[in-house]
Image (spheres, rainbow, N blue to C red):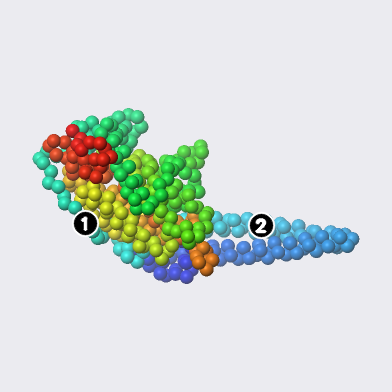
Amino acid sequence: MLQVSNIRANKEKYIAALAKRNFDAEDIFTRVLQLDETRRSTQSRLDDTLAEANQLSKEIGLLFKTGEHLKAGALKEQSAQLKEASRSLSEELTDAVAKLDQLLYSIPNIPHESVPAGTSEEDNEEIFKAGDIPVLAEGSMPHWELAKKYDIIDFELGNKITGAGFPVYKGKGARMQRALIAYFLDKAATSGYKEYQLPLLVNEASGYGTGQLPDKEGQMYHVTEEDLYLIPTAEVPLTNMFRDQMLSESDLPVTCTGYTPCFRREAGSYGAHVRGLNRLHQFDKVELVRIEKPENSFAALEGMVDHVKELLEELKLPYRILRLCGGDMGFTAALTYDFEVFSTAQDRWLEISSVSNFETFQTNRLKLRYKDKDGNKQLLHTLNGSALALPRVLAGILENYQTPEGIMVPEVLIPYTGFDRID
C-alpha cells in the first residue's frame, strides 16, 4: 500500500510510473488527497474537542470540591455537548479512514524505473538464457502422457477424489516430489535461509498484509464459516510472521524459507496450454522471503535471482529470465524477474519461478518497521521468490530427460530419490 505522504510529494512522478502498468492514477490520487485532508481536519477537530472536554472535566471537579455546585452543573451540560460532538467526530474520522484505506488498497505498487512499459507477457524483456535444449528421440511425449505410461501421476484419480487440477502422485512420481522439496530446502538452508513449517490457512488480516486481499480474493479458496483462506503461496504466512513488529538493525536481514502446498482457484483457465501439470489448483512450492533495509534490497534481489539460477543449472534444465513489463507484473511488486524452463516435448516455455522486490508496499500494510542507528523508525523492504514451484519443474524434467529406455533422473536428485531412472 502506498503512503499518502509519498503520493502527495510525488504525485506526478507516480502517475507517470503507474502508466507503465496501464493504470490511470490521476483521479484516484486526487480523491486520496482530498480524503486525507478530510481525515486530517477531522482528526484535528476531534483532538481539540477532546482537549476542551478534558479541561472542562478538570474545572468541574474543582468546582465540586469547592462547593460551587451550581457552576459545576452548568458546565456539566456543556461537557455533555462536547462528548456528543466528540462521538460524532470520531464516527466521521472512522468513516474517512475506512474510505481512504479502501482507495489505497486499490492502487498497485509503483514500478521500479527499470520496469519496461507494456500491456502483456509479449512485452516482457528476456535478460538471460542458459542451458542446451535437448534433441528428443522420435515418439517423445508431453509429460501428461509420460505420467500415464510410467504410472507416476494420475490426473483422473485426482479428478475422482476432488476435481480437475488436483493430481495424485504415485510411486516414483511421489518420491520425485519429495526429492525436489528436500533438495530445494537443503539449498535454501545452505544459502542461509531459516526454515519454517507454516499454517496452510491464514486470516483476513494476513491476506491484506501481503496484498492478496482485496486484489486476488477471487483466486483464493475461502473457508467461509471461520473466515480463513487457503494460502496461495508460503509468502503469505512467512511474511505475516513479522506483521506489527518493530525490528532492530541487528535483526536484519531476515531470511526465511518454507515448503507448503499452495492453493489457487485459477478461475477461467482452460485449454491445451493448461494440460497436465501446467496449471493446477493445488501444487507444492518452496518459497524464499527476505526482509531488508531499503538500501540493500536490490542487491538482495539479485542474490535471490542467482540462487534460483543455481538450482536450474544443477538440474541441467534449459531456462531463461524475463524482466516483467508493467502490464504483466503482479499488483504488489515493484520489480519482478520470471524464470521459465523450456519444455522440449511441448515446444514452449513454462514459468517456474517469480522473484520480486515489493519495496515498502507490503511493509506499509504490515506495519513492519525498524529503528535505524539514530533511533528513527523506517519501513523495511520485503522480497520473495519461488525456489522453486514443483509442477512445471517436474514437467520439464519428465519431458527433457525422457529417453527410449525411460526417464533419467537429474544427477543432483539421485541422492534424494534413491533411483536414477523411471522405467
Find the distance from the CA under tag 1 to the CA under tag 2: 62 Å
Q: Residues within 10 Å of mark 1 (few under 14, many from 20)?
A: some
Q: Earlier in the sequence, mark 1 or mark 2?
A: 2
Percent across and percent down for residue 219 are 39, 45
Question: Which dot marks residue 400?
Answer: none
Up-down relation of residue 245 to residue 159 (above or below): below
Given residues 395 and 179, the one toward you in this image is 179
Q: Which mark is residue 129?
A: 1
Q: Residue at x 37, y 44 (%)?
A: 259
Which of 357/413 is in front? 413
SS of the residue at dot 1?
strand
Q: Quadrant of residue 356?
A: bottom left
Question: Which residue: 12% across, 37% down?
Answer: 404
Classed neighbour count for the residue bearing mark 2: other residues with Cα under 10 Å, few (<14), some (14–19), many (≥20): few
Residue 195 image offset from top left, x and y in percent: 40, 47
> As drawn, is 137 to the left or to the right of 170?
left
Q: Is residue 63 visible?
A: yes
Residue 422 location in percent, x, y?
Answer: 20, 35
Q: Which residue is mark 2?
A: 88
In the picture, measured across the screen, residue 120 lies left or right of residue 214, that is left
Q: Quadrant of the C terminus?
A: top left
> Residue 128, relative to residue 312: is it above or below?
below
Query: In the depicted view, which residue is nearer to us: 186 or 336?
Result: 186
- Asked which quadrant contains residue 51, the reply is bottom right
Q: Is residue 42 left or right of residue 388?
A: right
- On the image, the x and y values in percent for residue 134 come to 14, 47
Q: Amino acid at mark 1?
A: Lys
Q: Identify the residue at horizontal 39%, vertical 48% (top origin).
A: 257
The type of residue carrying mark 2 is Ser
Pick the front one: 313 or 211: 313
Kind of element beneath mark 2:
helix
Residue farthest toward the left in the current orientation of the protein: 138
